[in-house]
Amino acid sequence: MPGRRALLACAFLALLRLGAARNTEEPASCTLVVPRSEWRALASKCSQHLKLPVRYVVVSHTAGSTCNTPALCQQQVRNVQHYHSQTLGWCDVGYNFLIGEDGLVYEGRGWDIKGDHTGPTWNPMSIGITFMGNYMERTPPPRALRAAQNLLDCGLARGALSSNYEIKGHRDVQQTLSPGDRLYEIIQKWNRYRE
Amino acid sequence: MRKARLWGLLWMLFVSELCEAAESMEEKCVLAEGQTLTVLCPFNNGKYMHSKKAWQRLMEGGEIRTLVHTEETSGKPSQVQVGKYMLKDVPTESALHVTMTNLQVEDSGLYHCVIYHPPREPQILFHPVRLVVTKNHSDTPASHESSTQNLAEITTTITTMSKLYTKPRLITKPSPMSTAVISSPGPRDVTNVADVFRIPLFSIVVPVACCLLTKSLVFTVLFAVTQRSIGA
């Protein structure tokens, strides 16, 4: 009797450890990203992959129109993609992810493909996330900021961001006003921000 | 005795469940003699576009030796080489590229990139780099691989929390490369150095708390079972 009990206990322990150790399915926060198919993206022509995990996240703003509903934001993401791919001739929308004032994250090039959001030094070693709008004088709503944080948690959980990843503002790494004075002030207070 | 065996088992499990320790802020790089070290030190574009930069070595005894420094303050890209040390400052890209060629065992030590404006105190860029140059064997794997192996050994008593936290990128296969790179821009030859890093306090507290919670739950259960079995 006692022997069997001990065996049961060990089995239980093993299961517990296994359960805790396994993390094979997509982390919860990653399922909230709006996939390309949903916002009706044009097919990407990009082929250059990022070497994961990356160490840096560059936060920018589009300096363009903002949107506050899923319908409007889907249209806005398509607009940005159109501008980048058709007008500028890039292989796809430049950013890895775009964040709308609807509080949703839109998949751009994603975690695996090198973006065209900063420059030749930073693009291959960072994930570029952008807030859709101009944040020189306005701040993104809390739901957009939460969405960004959630996205970064996702990146960390799936190993796309290294455990010691750092956040930089676009203006920290290039001569630009992006991500706008107000948004820059906000990200400087983020846990992972490093000048 | 059954009782002793059970307690022994319990104790073993306790010892094996070590929580991940806080890591230091150094960037560790292990290379073989003859290889080249490449480091990319980012710097703040707005602040340091027009500043001189330097690569310094922290000697034993506290002396800080400047090995090479840039002269250009116009904001234009510049390159300077002193022996085996080379600096390439690209202000428009906010990047300082450091190269140390033909490494020797004596080069092992602690280095850092700085904003160089004597007599003012230099500003440290990026993270201090702990360089370890090993004697040449027939086929020494590239830097980050060796240090990942070291790390893997150290953290074999890895916790469940650390598994949850990061994918097991520590256990990577060695690839034959003569140049070891830390945060280099080129996608093909970028190899991330396995670093030992300070995790922000929050990310220590949560795993530790969770670790303790899991452990206490497990032990409560086992304790109850053990007591029952001893009683029975």
Image (cartoon, coloured by chain):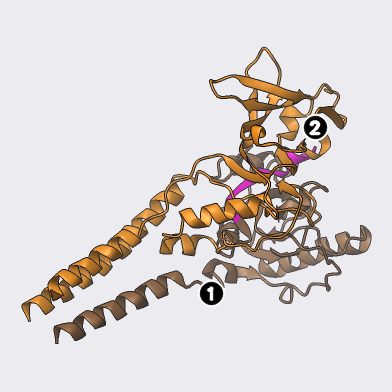
Chain colours: A brown, B orange
What residue is pinned by disc 1?
A24
Name the kind of residue labelled 2 in the image.
Answer: Met
Check the image and report above or below for B57 versus A181. Answer: above
Residue A100 placed where, x, y %? 67, 60
* Quadrant position of the N terminus of chain A in the picture: bottom left
Tell which tag, 2 or 1, sits nearer the viewer.
Answer: 2
Residue at (82, 34) in percent of width and height: B88
In reply to whether residue A111 is colored magenta, the answer given is no
Rounded to the nearest whole Å, what is the CA distance between mark 2 and mark 1?
A: 44 Å
Residue B133 placed where, x, y %? 65, 41
Magenta extent: A162-177
In reply to whether residue A164 is colored magenta, the answer given is yes
- Tag 2 near tag 1, CB within 8 Å: no
Crowd band around label 2 with a 10 angstrom C-alpha radius: few (<14), some (14–19), many (20+):
many
Q: Secondary structure at mark 1?
A: loop
Name the kind of residue labelled 1 in the image.
Answer: Thr
Crowd band around label 1 with a 10 angstrom C-alpha radius: few (<14), some (14–19), many (20+):
few
**Relative depth, front residue between B45 and B86:** B86
Q: Secondary structure at mark 2?
A: strand
Residue A151 placed where, x, y %? 60, 60
Residue B222 placed where, x, y %? 21, 72
| The label number, if any, that marks residue B86 in the structure image | 2
Residue B39 left/right relative to A32 = right
Confirm whether residue B184 shows in the render: yes
